[in-house]
Image (cartoon, helix red, strand yellow):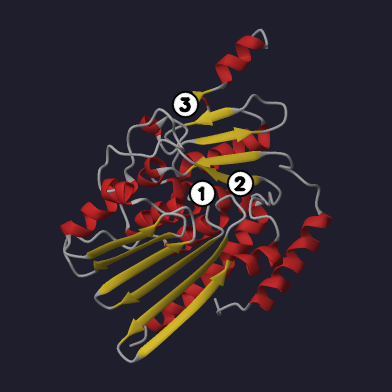
Amino acid sequence: MAKMTLEDLRKLRDSKKSEIQKRDIAGKDTQIIIGMGTCGIAAGAKVVLDAFLQALDANKLENVSVTQTGCMGLCYVEPTVEVITPGMPPVIYGKVDAAVAKTIVEDHVMRNKMVSDHVFDRPSADIIKDGGK
Amino acid sequence: MHASLCDFLSDIVQNAIEADSSEVRVSIEEREDAMSFVVTDNGKGMSEEIRRKVSDPFYTDGIKHKRRKMGLGIPFLMQAVDAVGGDFSLESEEGKGTTVAYRFPLKHIDCPPVGNLVSTLVSMLAFGGAYRMIVTRSLVLGETEESYELDRGDLWDLLGDFSSSGNLQLLKTYVQSQETALDEIRNRP
């Protein structure tokens, strides 16, 4: 890969934008929030951020919001990730690695299906509140 | 404990951003035998009393996490630098800002690996907030010196919101291309 200039980046951005406009926008309104406190960083949160970007790119999901936050208070299951997507309760996943991040994109973001083995907080309270439906 | 030099950098830069800074400058200089980092912010700075306590892992100012009794970022870094015979310094003035500078000797057997600098830079630039960040990254090998600069403001103006996955991917592609140019120099026979 040749060293890009800002002008190269501008051209790449413009070509990507025109590609996106041709597609249906999937993943819109979905938020992925990655715990990037000291505990998260030590446990590999940046690998997870990278894996989410790769999986979203591979599935052509350009409009998902990916942000970072500090420690979510679940240091014992870092890296932690909160996923908020329409039609689903907010879910905090723990012990997320690159493979789990890919599964979260493919199952939770794209198919509204929780990755149950890695759910550590939030959904049970919401499900109970909604009568388990 | 952190696994790579990049992990320490993430922590220190995050401290700088969270100190209410409007500008953070990061310098990363790699030589054959050492990697040096300088993180300067114009945030709230530290009083003399807090400066004395930053090496204590059981001290925190309690602002970010009210019930938390630990602050591990700087103690982790100081211990790691000490273990490999590197250098660490912290200068801070209340109300003016803080500079953290440290150097790891890369050839020390216990020196952690550099880690993924591209992901680290993307993560640093994309951390939430309206701060300006300028990263200067250089590689010095003998007589050869190559560097690049990332200005968060310029990149934000060009790409827009860094929380969008598409924009983050573009940012990553851009940073990767800068690092690939340095790799080519590093791999020259």
Q: Which mark is residue A66?
A: 2
> In the rendering, at what x and y percent does residue B174 appear?
58, 69
Give the secondary structure at mark 2.
strand
Tell me how many marks there are: 3
Query: Within the image, what quadrant is residue A75 found in?
Result: top left
Query: 10 Å neighbourhood of mark 1: few (<14), some, or many (≥20)?
Result: many
> In the rendering, at what x and y percent does residue A30 appear?
68, 39
**In front: mark 1 or mark 3?**
1
**Dot 3 corresponds to which residue?**
A117
CA distance separating discs 1 and 3:
20 Å
Q: Quadrant of the C terminus of chain B?
A: bottom left
Q: Classify residue B156 as left or right of residue A46.
A: right
Q: Nearer the viewer, residue A71 or B120?
A: A71
Asked if marks 1 and 2 touch (Cβ < 8 Å), the reply is: yes
**Dot 1 corresponds to which residue?**
A49
Query: 10 Å neighbourhood of mark 3: few (<14), some, or many (≥20)?
Result: few
**In front: mark 3 or mark 2?**
2
In this rendering, the answer to whether A48 lies above or below B160 is above
Question: Does residue B2 appear in this view?
Answer: no
Q: The disc numbered 3 marks a residue on which chain?
A: A
Q: Nearer the viewer, residue B176 or B69?
A: B69
> In the rendering, at what x and y percent does residue A5 appear?
62, 79
Q: The disc numbered 2 marks a residue on which chain?
A: A
Query: 10 Å neighbourhood of mark 2: few (<14), some, or many (≥20)?
Result: many
Q: Classify residue A29 as left or right of residue A49.
A: right
Query: Within the image, what quadrant is residue B152 found in?
Result: bottom right
Question: Does residue B55 appear in this view?
Answer: yes
Which amino acid, by three-letter code, is at mark 3?
Asp
Q: Residue furthest right?
A: A22
